[in-house]
Image: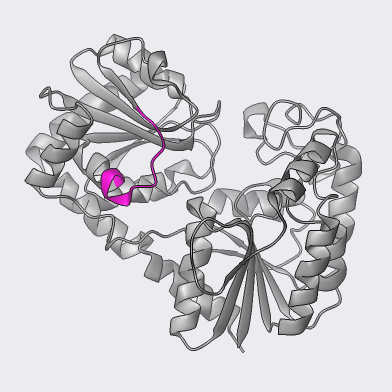
């Protein structure tokens, strides 16, 4: 069968997930092609749609409440390629990254013979514009988005509130076919989707996966080399946080506050959006975002505890990545974040309660010194969150008779 996937990029969490599905489909004997708005890697069977200028122009339109209304020529070319390929199956991922014109794409999707699937990487497909809304406890997505509290401050940002219009626009486009099958990486997001205008469509849960052959505990020498490289060789226990971008949802400031309160530990954050000069205390190390997988595996392995304090997230891959490297996790109790964490591998906390997090750090440090919790972390990640587990479930769903 012929599979086409469409995603914003060939990198990052959604890009890696799409590429895992791509490779598994090819290995199973299917034809598979990925179209992406931003392409950085030399993958076979991966084509770029649009141009940097097109993306910048579309992003400017989005600031005026027109996200999904730009990229007309790029999407026409994409649809032309889709007509040439005539795929049996189309899997959508993130389509709100300023590279797709919704009207043009869905005019094709709603009239083609292909089976359509859509992985929900956030809430955007069923809101008037926002990707997440839990911080404001908004329920408008259940009936009619309007007077949005987040659109001017959260990605994808807009200066003009068009949530009412965009909600109706999406509803008309996305509900035209009642056989679009949605896939959620978390139970949390699946429940939200079932309460939205796409709730009458089939919704399946498939957890995101990682390559546990690559995310694996490093040996003592490799771990020591990483510690030396980043100046983490002071003998202190290491508390780690990782984010692609440290925005308000990810709570970088929490690590700064914890570092001030707990000088006996070394706190380390990895990700874009924070300058090293922001550390402001001796026991907080800021490492920029890196695409060096060996470094990331070494950093995860060097850490004694991993903290995911996100206020809003779907099924963050940083959690199974840490577990796969043998590092126990303190996880936010909010949204989909806690779904990969159980008592044998970590502790679930209120991410805004610093004392609760401090208590959890002490408990896990003690547990790590007296039990084989690292082995339990590794076993859980391999059994449940290896990308082969994820892709097996995807292929059974996508290519079912």
Horizontal relation, residue 117 to residue 383: left or right: right
Q: Is residue 42 above or below residue 162?
A: below
In percent of width and height, residue 48 lies at: 64, 63
Horizontal relation, residue 121 to residue 393: left or right: right
In percent of width and height, residue 31 lies at: 57, 84
Is residue 175 among what the camera can see? no
- Write the residue at 76% across / 73% down: 179
In percent of width and height, residue 268 lies at: 30, 27
Instruction: State which region is magenta.
Output: 287-296
In percent of width and height, residue 347 lies at: 32, 36
Count of marks overlaid on the render: 0
Q: Is residue 295 magenta?
A: yes
The colour scheme of the drawn protein is one colour
Q: Quadrant of residue 205?
A: bottom right
Residue toward you, 215 or 63: 63
Q: Quadrant of residue 358?
A: top left
Q: Is residue 58 above or below residue 241?
A: below
- Write the residue at 83% across / 66% down: 76
Q: Is residue 195 above or below residue 231?
A: below
- Write the residue at 79% across / 62% down: 75
Is residue 263 among what the camera can see? yes
Q: Is residue 399 magenta?
A: no
Q: Quadrant of residue 157?
A: top right
**Could you tell me which quadrant the C terminus lies in?**
bottom right
Horizontal relation, residue 84 to residue 348: left or right: right
**Could you tell me which quadrant the N terminus lies in?**
bottom right
């Amino acid at each position: 069968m012929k599979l086409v996937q469409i995603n914003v990029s060939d990198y990052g969490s959604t890009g890696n997930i799409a590429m895992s599905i791509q490779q598994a489909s090819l290995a199973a004997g299917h034809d598979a092609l990925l179209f992406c708005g931003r392409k950085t890697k030399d993958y076979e069977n991966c084509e770029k749609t649009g141009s940097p200028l097109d993306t910048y122009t579309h992003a400017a339109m989005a600031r005026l409440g027109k996200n999904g209304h730009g990229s007309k020529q790029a999407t026409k070319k994409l649809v032309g390629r889709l007509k040439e390929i005539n795929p049996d199956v189309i899997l959508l991922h993130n389509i709100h990254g300023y590279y797709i014109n919704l009207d043009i794409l869905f005019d094709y999707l709603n009239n083609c013979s292909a089976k359509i699937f859509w992985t929900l990487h956030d809430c955007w497909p069923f809101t008037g514009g926002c990707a997440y809304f839990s911080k404001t406890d908004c329920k408008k997505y259940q009936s009619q988005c309007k007077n949005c509290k987040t659109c001017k401050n959260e990605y994808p940002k807009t200066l003009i509130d068009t949530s009412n219009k965009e909600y109706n626009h999406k509803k008309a486009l996305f509900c035209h076919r009642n056989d679009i099958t949605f896939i959620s990486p978390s139970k949390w997001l699946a429940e939200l989707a079932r309460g939205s205008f796409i709730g009458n469509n089939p919704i399946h849960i498939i957890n995101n996966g990682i390559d546990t052959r690559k995310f694996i505990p490093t040996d003592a020498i490799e771990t020591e080399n990483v510690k030396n490289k980043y100046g983490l060789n002071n003998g202190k226990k290491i508390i780690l946080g990782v984010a692609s971008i440290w925005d308000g949802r990810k709570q970088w400031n929490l690590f700064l506050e914890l570092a001030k309160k707990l000088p006996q530990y070394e706190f380390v954050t990895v990700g874009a959006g924070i300058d090293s000069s922001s550390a402001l205390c001796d026991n907080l190390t800021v490492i920029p975002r890196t695409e060096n997988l060996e470094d990331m595996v070494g950093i995860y392995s060097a850490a004694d505890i991993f903290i995911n304090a996100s206020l809003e997230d779907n099924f963050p891959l940083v959690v199974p990545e840490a577990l796969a490297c043998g590092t126990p996790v303190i996880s936010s109790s909010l949204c989909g974040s806690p779904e990969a964490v159980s008592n044998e591998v970590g502790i679930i906390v209120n991410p805004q309660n610093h004392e609760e997090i401090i208590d959890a750090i002490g408990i896990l440090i003690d547990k790590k010194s007296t039990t084989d919790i690292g082995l339990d972390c590794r076993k859980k990640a391999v059994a449940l969150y290896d990308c082969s587990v994820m892709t097996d479930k995807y292929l059974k769903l996508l290519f079912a008779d």
